[in-house]
Image (spheres, rainbow, N blue to C red):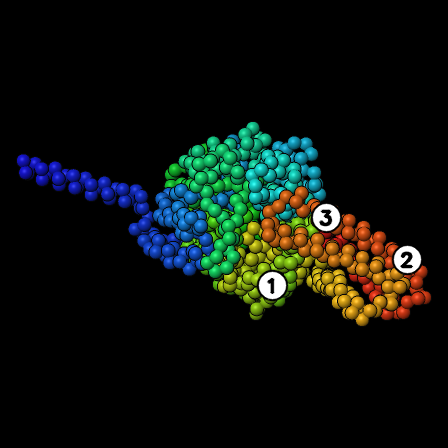
Amino acid sequence: MFKKGAAILIAALLFLSYSFVVFAEQSTPAASGGTTPSGIPLSGLEAFVDDYMKKYIGQSTSGASVVIAKDQQIVLSKGYGYADIENQLPMEPQKTILEWGSISKLIVWTAVMQLVEKGDMELQADIRTYLPPDFLTKLKFEEPITMLNLMNHNAGFEEYMFDMAYQSPNDVRTLEEGLLLAQPAQVYKPGEVVAYSNFGNSLAAYIVERITGQKFNEYADEHIFTKLAMNDSSALSTLEDRPDLIARKSKGYFYSGPATFTPGSWNYMSMYPNGGNNGTAEDLAKFAMAFMPAEGERSALFDQPGTLSEMLASSYSVEADMPGIAHGFWEYAGEHKGMGHGGNTIAFSSQLQIVPEDHFAIVILTNQAGETDIVHGLTKALLGQRKPEALTNDLPDSSELAGSYIAARRPFYGFMNLYSYLTLLKIVPKGTNEIQLSIAGMTADYKQIKPFLYEKAGGDTALDSWLALHFKVEGHQVEKMTTYTTDYLPLPSNKSVPVLIASAFLAVISIAYVILMPIIWIIQALLQRKRNERAAWTEAGLKKYVVMLTLTGSAVIVNIAILALRMLSNYERAYSEMIIHIIVNYVLTALAILFIVLLLRQLTMKKHMLSLSRKILAIVPIIIMIILILLLVFWQFYS
């Protein structure tokens, strides 16, 4: 009896041991060997990521979900910080719902390739063949826009800053209505300039709707999420059909100082396909792994292996060694060629990268606006950076690249065009083959490795997505500079640096006058009242018009200041919210013109009664107001 029991016990132990080994091999087969593309051993991956995150979580970043996959297996899935700081709810990659931002665009491009595979769409066809008549009403060029142009972000659209995202689900319209409401102008010839376009991606999703007869979120559920068992994800920004996901959704935050975070709004979109997805980090990792199936297996996303190969092949690049675009994926200059997409919403930031050569993927979702230390910094640490090649001979001198550049992705029409000129990119040579790039207070150094191709050698981690730069130069003149997601162009002649400096100088003088003069008059009035005096020019009947005209200028500046503060406090707004400021500008300008006419009439009638100094005091506000009106026209504050 004892021997029989011992035999059973030994057999059970052997079975449990075998089961444990099999389970361990199935769950983390890569953890015992292999490395990240940058060379970090997978056996020490968790410790490395933990150590990296300690510097930022709770200090400069509110929370993050990190999922890393290798060879079709998740080798790290971990939450850091809080999904809800106030209630101390932890971040959980398998449970916490976060906003994906522009990573959502990859769902659209996947849907497009599925339809191409079925023969329902052609990448080179004119997209107007898939749209209702006269749907695109602001096209400038005769050249057709193709689906490939939309995928490569070179359809030529300007950036339209309004009606993209809202802070209330009640503002959301249908996808078609959103596209019609926020239609941008076409400002570049198709295929010539890369200018990242949210509108273009949502337009592609609308074409998917037109072809399939399904709402895009329903198509994504059936043909992508369900196929990949992404049960905790939705393409609908309002999540109105998934209250279970709303209950698990993280709060969003803004960084407002060391270890201090301010709650931000969730993101709601009419053009939701370009940035409205919500889901867990582990779900997003399933999507990433679907693009790197095991040897001999096919992706669940496509019926033919050739479709996946085509999608991951480069579809646009300005130079063989410059990372370009692979049918909607942005290529990444890591140790091995990577590709992926980043994302930002009102209060969330994200990153997805795959390295097909290594069957490696990383997903980072954070609940903080504009986060870069982890989204870009950790990505670079895990993927590495391409080792610069040996310098070739006779490289062009960097000095001809010096200057200021403006993003091709910018508003061309309306007052928001001013913003792009406040954030110019500057290139300063640092020796024959090195340059320093600076933008928005950030700087990075780049070294030339081939003619006009530069790779990042150091600088702010926020610029780690810009690991390479390429300059197109003709006749010693830079035509464009290519970076990650957009081109930068030399300043247009009507807004050259001297013109911008002159504009800024006139603006400072005008603003100072209309703000300071009322203060000076108040002080003068108090002193005169104390001395029982009366201004000489009051008797000539001029002062009331001077005061009215000046105060009208003051009102213009106050109106512009309120508009700017509203946009800075929340740049995701409907144009209907801001049009009141445009109307006020028209009303104040009409009043100013009236007061100018009345003042000039008084000057003409009283010219013999006034000294030269009094005439100058009356003419100055006229000149100041004319300058203000011209500046409003120049910077399009009437539209």
- Dot 3 alpha-carbon crowd within 10 angstroms: few under 14, some 14 to 19, many 20 or more: some
Element type at marker 1? strand
* Kind of residue indicated by mark 2: Arg
Q: Where is mark 3, residue-wise?
A: 582
Q: Which label sits in the foreground, 3 or 1?
A: 3
* Kind of residue indicated by mark 1: Ile
- Dot 2 alpha-carbon crowd within 10 angstroms: few under 14, some 14 to 19, many 20 or more: few
Q: Where is mark 1, residue-wise?
A: 427
Which quadrant of the view contains residue 556? Answer: bottom right
Q: In the image shown, does 217 or 485 lie closer to the viewer? A: 217
Q: Which numbered disc flags the more N-terminal residue, 1 or 2?
A: 1
Q: CA distance from mark 3 to mark 1?
A: 35 Å
In the image: residue 170, left or right of residue 626: left
Q: CA distance from mark 1 to mark 2?
A: 52 Å
Q: Where is mark 2, residue-wise?
A: 601
**Is residue 400 in view?**
yes
- Residue at position x 51%, y 35% from top? 240
Q: Which numbered disc flags the more N-terminal residue, 2 or 3?
A: 3
* Kind of residue indicated by mark 3: Ile
Q: Which label sits in the foreground, 2 or 3?
A: 2
Q: In the image shown, does 312 or 102 lie closer to the viewer? A: 102
Q: Is residue 432 above or below residue 274?
A: below
- Residue at position x 63%, y 64% from top? 402
Q: Which numbered disc flags the more N-terminal residue, 3 or 1?
A: 1
- Dot 1 alpha-carbon crowd within 10 angstroms: few under 14, some 14 to 19, many 20 or more: many
Horizontal and vertical percent position of residue 257: 50, 59
